[in-house]
Image (spheres, rainbow, N blue to C red):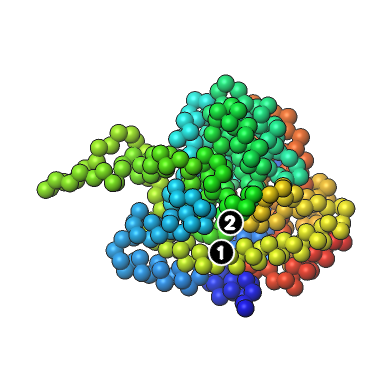
Amino acid sequence: MQTAAQTFNKIKIKNRSSEKKETKLTNGVFKGRLPVLKDVWDLIPNYKVQVPQESIDLIVEVLKSGWIGGDGPKVKEFETKIAEIVGNKNILALNSGTSALQLALRIAGVSGGEVVSTPMTCFATNAAIAQEGADIVWTDIDPETGNIDPYDIAKRVTKRTRAIMIVHWGGFPCDLDLINKIAKVFNIPVIEDAAQALGSEYKGKPIGIHSDYVAFSTQAIKIINTADGGLLATKRRKDWETAKRLRWYGIDRDKRIDGPTFWHYPIKETGSKMQMTDILAALGLGQLPYLDDILKHRRKIAKIYDKAIDNNKNLKRQKVIEGAKPNYWIYTVITQGNKHRLELYEKLKSIGVRAEEAHRRNDLYPVFKKYKKEELPGVARFDESEIIVPVGQWVTEEKADQIAQVLANF
Ligand SMILES: Cc1ncc(COP(=O)(O)O)c(C=O)c1O
C-alpha cells in the first residue's frame, strides 16, 4: 500500500518555494505582526498546488474535443461526482468560490439588508456580502474554534437581517445544528462559506447538505483544485435552478427555442457569467481519485500534532466541536499572543518549516470602515494568537514528528 505522501509525490507539484521571488512587505494596517513573505520560499509550505497526470490527460482530451468552454460534459461529470461526495444532487460548478457566495447571497435576497458574518475569514467572504449590496454585521467568534459564536449570532439579528454567513475555519465545521436552529427561529437562511471544507463532515454527513446554501472553493491551493473555481450546493432544487440561470447571464439553457436561422431563450432576469469551463473541470476530475488519500494523510499528520500540543499547556490546538470531522485544510495552533506566536514562528523556521497566520480580521480593513464597529473579544484573542503549520501531503511523518517535537517542547 502506498502512503498518501507517496501517492502525492506522483502528482506533479508546482512548489512556490521554487519561485524564489522577492516579495514586498505589506505596509500600514497590520504592522508589527509576523514577518511577511520575504525569506520563506525555501521552507516547507502550508499550501501547494497539485496537478496529477490524470488531470493533464483529461485536459488534453478536452482540448482535442472542441468543447473547451462552460457547461460541457466534463463540467457535468465534475458536478455529478461532487454530488456523490457531498451527498447532495443540487451542485453547480462555477468560476470561483466567491461566485458561489455571491449567487447564494443574491438568491437569499440580501441586497438592502444586513448579513451577520464573521471577520475571521478570507476577505472574499465579506467582500461578497458588500458586493451584493448588504451591510455586514460583525459577529464574534469562539476563540477556541475560530468559528462564529452561535450565541452571538442570536444577539446580532435585527429586522433587517437577510442571511447568516458562517465560515468553517480551516475546514473545521461550525455548530451547524445550533446555527440552523437559530436561523429557523428568525426565519433567515444560512450560507456556509465552506471554501476550505470540501471533505469535512458534521454528525456523520459531509459538509454540503446541512444548510440552505453551501459555497466551496476549488481555487489553486484547495483540497481539490480547478486552478480557480467553486461549487454551490443548495438545499432546495428551486434555488439550484435559479443559480443555474444566474451563472449564465440569466439564461435557462434547457429552454432554448430553435428557429431556422436563430435560437433564443425566454430570458426573464439578468445574471452574470460565472460558469466553470470544461478545461478546469477536467483538472479537478483528475484529482478526485486522490481525495480519500489526501484526507487520510492530513488527518494522520494532524493526530501527531494533536498529541504533542495536548502534552503542552503553553499551546492549544483548534477545538473540534462534537460531531465534527475536519478535513485539516490547515492546522491551526493557538499561542498565547503575538509575541509568543513570533517565537514559535522562529522555532519552526529553524527546522525549515513555514508557520504563518491564515487570515486577518476583516473588520479592520479600511474598506469596511462604514460598518458598525463591534466589541469582539473572541476575534481579538484568536486574531492575535493563531498560527498555522503545514499538514498537507508533502509533510512526511518524519517531518511531522520533528514539528511535533517543537510543539511539545515550546
Ligand atoms: C474562507 C474563504 N472564503 C472564500 C474564498 C474565496 O474563494 P475563491 O478564491 O475560489 O473565490 C476563499 C478563498 O480561498 C476562502 O478561503
Please, which residue is most extreme toward the left here? 260
The kind of residue on which mark 1 rests is Leu
Q: Which of 206 and 330 is in front in this view?
A: 206
Query: Where residue 379 appears, x then y in whole percent?
Result: 72, 38
Q: What residue is shown with label 2?
A: 199
**Residue 295 rendering spot, x and y as whole percentages:** 62, 62
Q: Are marks 2 and 1 in contact (CB under 8 Å)?
A: yes
Pick the quarter of the image with the C terminus: bottom right
Q: In this view, does 359 lie to the left or right of 222?
A: right
Residue density around tag 2, few if under 14, some if 14–19, many if 20 or more, within 10 Å: many
Which of the two residues, 265 or 350, is positioned nearer the viewer here?
265
Tell me what residue is drawn at x 33 percent, y 34 percent: 269
What residue did someone put label 1 on? Answer: 291
Quadrant of res 40: bottom right
Looking at the picture, does residue 174 appear above or below residue 137? below
Measuring from the top left, give residue 208's x and y in whole percent: 54, 48
Residue displayed at 35% across by 65% down? 62
Query: Of helix, strand and loop, which one carries label 1?
Result: helix
- Left or right: 111 as drawn, with respect to 45: left
